[in-house]
Amino acid sequence: MIYVENKDLVIPGQVLADDEYYSGRGTFKENGKVCSSLLGRVSLRNKKIRVIPLKSKYVPKKGDVVIGKINDVRFSMWDVDINSPYSGILPAFEVFGREKKELNKVYDVGDVLFLRVVDVDEIKKAKLGLKGRGMGKFKGGIIVDIAPTKVPRLIGKKGSMINMIKDKTNCKIVVGQNGLVWVKGDEDMEQLTKSVIHLIEAEAHTSGLTNKIKNKLYLAIDGEIPPEEVPEEEEEFVLEKPKLQNFKEELEQEEREAEENKKEKEEKPNIAEVIEEFKRKNKKDNTLSYGDNSNNSFILNNK
Amino acid sequence: MMSEMIRDDGRKFNELRPIKIEAGVLERADGSAYLEVGGNKILVAVYGPRESYIRRLLEPNTGVIRCRYNMAPFSVDDRKRPGPDRRSSEISKITADALRPALMLENYPRSMIDIYIEVIEAEGGTRCAGITAASVALVDAGIPMKDIVVGCAAGKVNDEIVLDLSEKEDKEGQADVPIAIMPRTGEITLLQSDGNLTEEEFAKAIDLAMEGCLEVSKLQKEALMKKYSIE
Amino acid sequence: MDIVPEITRQSITNLVMNDKREDGRELNEYRDISIETNVISKAEGSARVKIGGTQVIVGIKPQLGSPFPDTPELGVLMTNCEMLPMADPNFEPGPPSDDSIELARVVDRGIRESELVELDKLCVEEGKHVWMLFIDLHIIDNCGNLFDACELAVMAALKSTKLPVATIVDDEVVLSEDETFDLPINNELALCTFVKIGDKMVLDPTLDEERVASARLNVGVTKDGRICSMQKGGSQPLNKEELLSAVNVAVSKTKELIEHL
């Protein structure tokens, strides 16, 4: 017996189903009942019930890409605020190997970086690194802060939402899995992008959102709404894993590339390229479904 | 015979004062709630899970909560001096104890959740109202929980067991029994008793308070659904 | 401690240099303002004020007390402010911080120096019994510019304050059960707060604007255009031109603010 439907809004303690259903993330089993532990929406796949939270703090996970702020410069590492109950550290050797440099000449307090979580220790402190295309310090632009659980909706199915925004506003956008988003473009476009990102965050659960956002952008930029509607994929998106990239594969590839490009190390790649790269990979790897428990989920994988 | 009795404010023995609950009322807090019951006005903000610099309070295997119940100086008839006193410290402690059994914080070891309960106006029963509002604020903050704890009091006034004592009834009454429960299982997470009761009266008071809790629980859920359901 | 990201500092500064702001306002424009009075029935005067996302509640409680020896015929005002930890993740529980005391004192100064509360009418018996008004500010949501929100709240609450009629019977003060009188107020006042970003003065700063600002200026102006309180804050200096232009804006904005009361 099941008491809820897919995408239903549920609250902590609510009984979702009887014993024959499996308790997935965001749920627990008690006295033969599957109950929700979160405020969120039900995701039902076969006999497995999950609850996708509406809000949740970012907990660092190996392989994630995050946006962080340098909070302190120490002797051999930087302290990094990654918008999480757990802070990150960026060890100096992750940045310039065994070479001796003055750390604050490289990254100083207040700098914002695109980083990868290299490892998470037993007290959840995140060891960060810069191995990967586009990793490093952001120059210019703005930071937009959203609930980490809304990141998949911002990206959209196969990047449909984020790509539409980028195309229309001509802004570069980098999304960290910790809910921070970097936007750079024309000053007014940055602010417009920020406002639509917040709109997406607020209305992530509503249907027809991609078209709504598209219309809003066209109206703001061209003064008129485009005639054709993009086919809406609202049925899946809330529960969809973002099709950003396969982190493992990418990590390995980047390590290989890093080896090859060691001499050109100083030359920093364009962040926009990273996004393009993501896009390209997404097209290849878009068969992941929500129930899939592989290693490249933003919010669902709790390993 | 009890159902015939009409109370000072016109309520029946098992009738709650009018209640209003709203979720997500503050911008900065991670979660928040506002609750009015009778003349009580309670505002709760939740921050966390977040890092804490008070290392000794943290635990290696789970997140911890800290609660601060505070009364505004203008919340009572005679101005209250700002800052904590013995009463508010005790309520802070038992409120944290009442909420803790419902929390599932294993995924947030060494983190801290702060719950700030502000009594903007007090009219009897602020501790239960604070717990009820704090639970809604915790849900609003996205904190994983087994259940939404809810509080309500019963007591003895004019030799009758009645639900949800007003300030006047509390002052003039013979006993006050505030409780909090996890409504799905009926487990009791807060119990105080202040005054004189027989064994039968106590049993009756608990039953009545639990009924009251279940009523209030519905309103907590409605408030959350109203805030977050699709328009 | 909360460090402002360098790129946030740059982007806000760049916007302001082009006379723009993150929320689309003009440099001299307030966010939406709402004022409600009589929000607390147990307080003799109260108000809740919102400026954008910033939210404060104030309650006024009177008590009979002895006057100060040098002003035996005047009532007493006392302003206290609690920056509640609920309002901002960086506010700590505990006794009022320096910021909180400064805020209370700046708000108080405007009320006091404008002499808009007729303190002589708060005297019950000269040298013995006067009304003391406790003005308690509760900051519940901090999204920038607490100063102006607090001053508006206090002003609105004072205007809504009713005190019980007190008489002396056989050398003792007797309070009337049902008879009240309106707190005598003869003027209105508002505070305009500016921050300096780049080389511009910005009115009604948001939290981020406050965090990147180099200096702050509060200007308290009465309805009839008297400047009755000012305070400069922040770590960097201001020059004379900046002060004068801000004062000029404040004098005209005060009228707009007072309309909300």
Image (cartoon, rainbow, N blue to C red):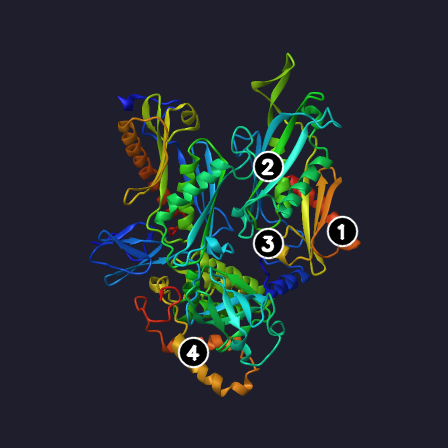
| C-alpha span from label 1 to label 2 | 30 Å
The reply to whether the C-beta atoms of the residues labelled 2 and 4 are less than 8 Å apart is: no
The quadrant in which the N terminus of chain A is found is: bottom left
> Could you tell me the amino acid type at mark 2?
Asp
Disc 3 secondary structure class: helix
Q: Horizontal and vertical percent for residue B116? A: 48, 45
Q: Give the amino acid type for the residue marked by disc 1 in the picture.
A: Leu
Q: Vertical placement of A24 versus A129: above or below?
A: above
State the mark number for residue C136. 2
User: Tag 2, which secondary structure?
Assistant: strand
Q: Residues within 10 Å of mark 4 (few under 14, many from 20)?
A: some
* Disc ID at residue B211: none
Looking at the rendered structure, the kind of residue marked 3 is Leu
Residue C54 image point, x, y percent: 56, 47
Viewed as shown, does residue B107 lie left or right of C177? left
- Front of the two marks 1 and 2: 2
Between B163 and B173, the one lying in front of the other is B173
- To which chain does the residue with label 2 belong? C
Q: Secondary structure at mark 1?
A: helix
* Nearest to viewer (mark 2 / mark 3): 2
Badge 2: how crowded within 10 Å, few (<14), some, or many (20+)? many
Local packing at callout 1 (Cα closer than 10 Å; few below 14, some 14-19, many 20+) is: some
* Residue holding disc 3: C207
- The CA span between labels 3 and 4 is 38 Å
Q: Position of residue C195 (x, y in %)?
A: 68, 53
Q: Quadrant of residue C105?
A: top right
Which residue type does callout 4 highlight?
Leu
Pair 1/4: label in front: 4
Q: Quadrant of residue A228?
A: bottom left
Q: Chain of mark 4?
A: A
Residue pointed to by mark 1: C243
Q: Which residue is mark 4?
A: A251
